[in-house]
Amino acid sequence: MNKETFFTELNKELVKNKVSDIDEILAEFEEHFAYKIDEGKTEEEVVKKIGNPVDIAKDYANQAKPAKQSGSLVVKIGLVISDFFVFFMFLIMWASVFVLGVFAITSLALGALLVVNGNIASLIPSMPYVSSLIFGISFFGLSVVSGIGTIYLYLYVKQWQKAYFRWHKNILNNNIYPSLSKHPKLAKKKQSRLKLLNMIGIIIFVGAFIIGYIVSAIIANSGGFWHVWEWFI
Amino acid sequence: MNIQYKKGVIELCILAALSKMDMYGYELSTNISKEIDISDGTVYPILRKLKSDGLVTTFLSEFSGGPPRKYYSITEVGKTKYQVESKEWLDFSNTIHRMLGGDKNE
């Protein structure tokens, strides 16, 4: 067996035996190898003297057991309480994702109605078609921005939930699994595309809104064109 | 010799070595496996047990540019335990020694 197989084996056995802080253990064996090889031993010689990974992992597992049992009830009660609060936290976050998503779809629908000059159930106040078209475009921009916001929020909430589940599992299993990042992984290309799209969305939304206001004000010959067109009566 | 038999003594040997000075894990491993026929790896799980029992502590030492290395040091609790147990062990081994007829003067 060479050094690499020894470490692979040891890692595998430690995981199998649910030993905690595996990185620390492996680092110490790395030190051992470095020291012995400095002394002029070959990797094979060191491996031969170091012992069987199966036995070493069992030794770690045997001495860890009493520590695991003590306080485990307290830990479990704490975990249940934490789960209870976190459950509501995630419920609120998922609700936010939903609300933002609905907002994006509504903006899209409103934009479409304005652009085609369709007025369902007199939802849209009267205005010249030019204003309607420009405001419609502005709403498309808003829908893009809130749509991307929804995607990001969704990805984050999903990642947080995953990370929480992993943490939960680790508490019950002596930290044997690597903890997860709090940030979702998004391909660089996809990320930069979304950023660009978001930027365009903001520009369209703000730009079209301002232009829409100016155009409407000119047509109505009033800064408060909504009074002229009797919107809020 | 039976391996379980040895493992019980190694704890005491580690405490003995650390009560003289702080050491790296591999120094302890080398010193002990020189005297007692055990695998080099046997010492590390025992060191971890001693640490979780509060008998030894560890600290990382940055040494001559290399990666930080783990140093072991005995605690006050460890010292007390070592004094008590080494005395017990010496008494015990003297008795066995005598009973096995190793020393004809006593």
Image (cartoon, helix red, strand yellow):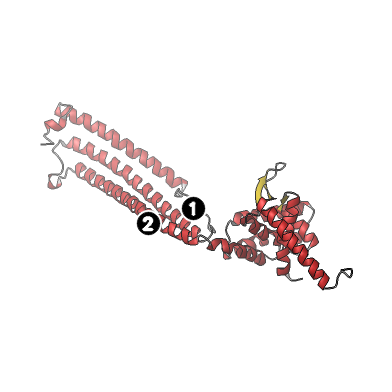
Q: Quadrant of residue A7?
A: bottom right
Up/down of A189 relative to A3, above or below: above
Up/down of B70 relative to A202, above or below: below
Task: Look at the numbered disc 2 and give the secondary structure of its residue.
Answer: helix
Residue A4 appears in the rendering = no
Amino acid under disc 1: Leu
Residue to which mark 2 is pinned: A84
Percent x, y for residue B94? 80, 66
Task: Look at the numbered disc 1 and give the secondary structure of its residue.
Answer: loop
Percent x, y for residue B57? 65, 51
Q: Quadrant of the C terminus of chain A?
A: top left
Q: Nearer the viewer, mark 1 or mark 2?
A: 2
Amino acid under disc 2: Phe
Q: Which label sits on residue A180?
A: 1
User: At x 20% / y 42%, what residue is drawn?
Assistant: A114
User: At x 19% / y 35%, what residue is drawn?
Assistant: A131
Up/down of B47 relative to A144, above or below: below
Q: How many marks?
A: 2
Up/down of A142 relative to A78, above or below: above
